[in-house]
């Protein structure tokens, strides 16, 4: 009787589907990468959510995030795709960074030209500026830090970078440091900024200023931050906070880079699982992330941050 019961139960359950518990791969870098590649346009570019002037910058961020999978995007950048008078300064910085980080013999000329163009845009005060409106141009800490990171990628690729340009940029960043708060300001206003602190700190670390009081102070502030604080900003849906959300992506990117480069990456190892878990709570079921600049930008930024 027991044997017959076991046979019947076996036949009844033989064709039943096996229920699998969700795995980390259901959300994470693999899904984000697949979504990004599926939304690459035929010319290798990625479409912005709003103004066309952002196409080059967003394509550059996507190329940086895709790495070896971003060859088409790099070719688009090298050919001058989406380049024009209206290209934002952030777009120019990320295009330079991407072209240098993924430089090949076919894109070497474009990378060198991008570096020269970026150097020509540096101000007398050592900073890089972007136009907030036709009549307002201000020196930005975040943009200057990103420019220094792009120049570091150029140097790593074997492109000559004038030491004076780096020194002036570093001095500008250090002048934006608030010693009492151990943070950096985003502009001339004495208001501390998490994003400026993250990006300025990693720029100083990359250029060998890790022993300076400014880099050590910024790093101390960053290591005391909870990863969830960044993703709370990223999950905000109020339209007026779009700019804040997008700078939050830049801040989280800088935060992850700074912790990876600090003390052999030990600080990053302590929080990497929490960062991944926090990001997966705001990742869509199709693998994408969202922002005011569009899904390609946010998904690429997440891909740069998500633990591998």
Image (cartoon, grey):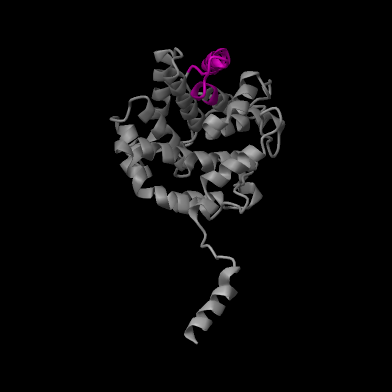
* Extent of the magenta region: 98-124
Q: Could you tell me residue 305's position as x and y percent?
A: 48, 41
Q: Residue at x 49, y 16 (%)?
A: 124
Q: Could you tell me residue 162's position as x and y percent?
A: 43, 12
Q: Is residue 5 magenta?
A: no
Q: Residue at x 41, y 29 (%)?
A: 203
Q: Could you tell me residue 134's position as x and y percent?
A: 67, 27
Nearer-the-camera pick, 165 or 77: 77
Q: Could you tell me residue 301's position as x and y percent?
A: 54, 39
**Number of marks in picture:** 0
Q: Residue at x 42, y 20 (%)?
A: 156
Residue 19 versus residue 70 in the image, above or below: below
Nearer-the-camera pick, 167 or 272: 272
Quadrant of the rendering where the C terminus is positioned: top left
Q: What secondary structure is the stretch in magenta mostly built from?
A: helix
Q: Is residue 265 left or right of residue 102?
A: left
Q: Is residue 58 left or right of residue 249?
A: right
Q: Is residue 137 visible?
A: no
Nearer-the-camera pick, 267 or 207: 267
Residue 113 versus residue 18 in the image, above or below: above
Residue 158 versus residue 273 in the image, above or below: above
Nearer-the-camera pick, 13 or 195: 13
Q: Is residue 104 magenta?
A: yes
Q: Is residue 51 left or right of residue 8?
A: right
């Amino acid at each position: 009787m027991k044997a017959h019961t076991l046979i019947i139960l076996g036949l009844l359950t033989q064709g039943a589907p096996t229920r699998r518990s969700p795995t980390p791969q259901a959300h994470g870098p693999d899904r984000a990468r697949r979504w990004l590649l599926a939304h690459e346009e035929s010319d290798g570019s990625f479409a912005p959510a709003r103004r066309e002037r952002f196409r080059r910058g967003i394509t550059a961020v996507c190329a940086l995030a895709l790495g070896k999978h971003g060859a088409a995007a790099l070719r688009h950048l090298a050919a001058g795709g989406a380049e024009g008078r209206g290209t934002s300064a952030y777009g120019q910085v990320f295009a330079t960074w991407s072209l240098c980080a993924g430089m090949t013999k076919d894109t070497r000329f474009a990378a060198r030209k991008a570096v020269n163009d970026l150097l020509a845009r540096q101000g007398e005060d050592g900073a890089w500026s972007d136009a907030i409106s036709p009549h307002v141009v201000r020196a930005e800490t975040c943009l200057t830090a990103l420019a220094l990171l792009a120049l570091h990628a150029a140097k790593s690729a074997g492109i000559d970078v004038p030491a004076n340009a780096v020194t002036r940029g570093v001095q500008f960043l250090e002048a934006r440091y608030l010693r009492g708060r151990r943070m950096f300001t985003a502009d001339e206003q004495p208001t501390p900024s998490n994003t400026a602190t993250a990006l300025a700190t990693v720029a100083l670390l990359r250029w060998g200023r890790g022993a300076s009081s400014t880099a050590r102070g910024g790093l101390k502030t960053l290591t005391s931050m909870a990863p969830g604080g960044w993703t709370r900003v990223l999950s905000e849906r109020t339209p007026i906070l779009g700019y804040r959300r997008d700078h939050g992506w830049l801040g989280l990117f800088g935060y992850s880079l700074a912790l990876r480069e600090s003390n052999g990456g030990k600080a990053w190892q302590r929080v990497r699982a929490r960062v991944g878990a926090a990001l997966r709570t705001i990742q869509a079921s199709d693998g994408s992330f969202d922002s005011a600049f569009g899904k390609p930008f946010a998904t690429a930024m997440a891909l740069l941050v998500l633990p591998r």
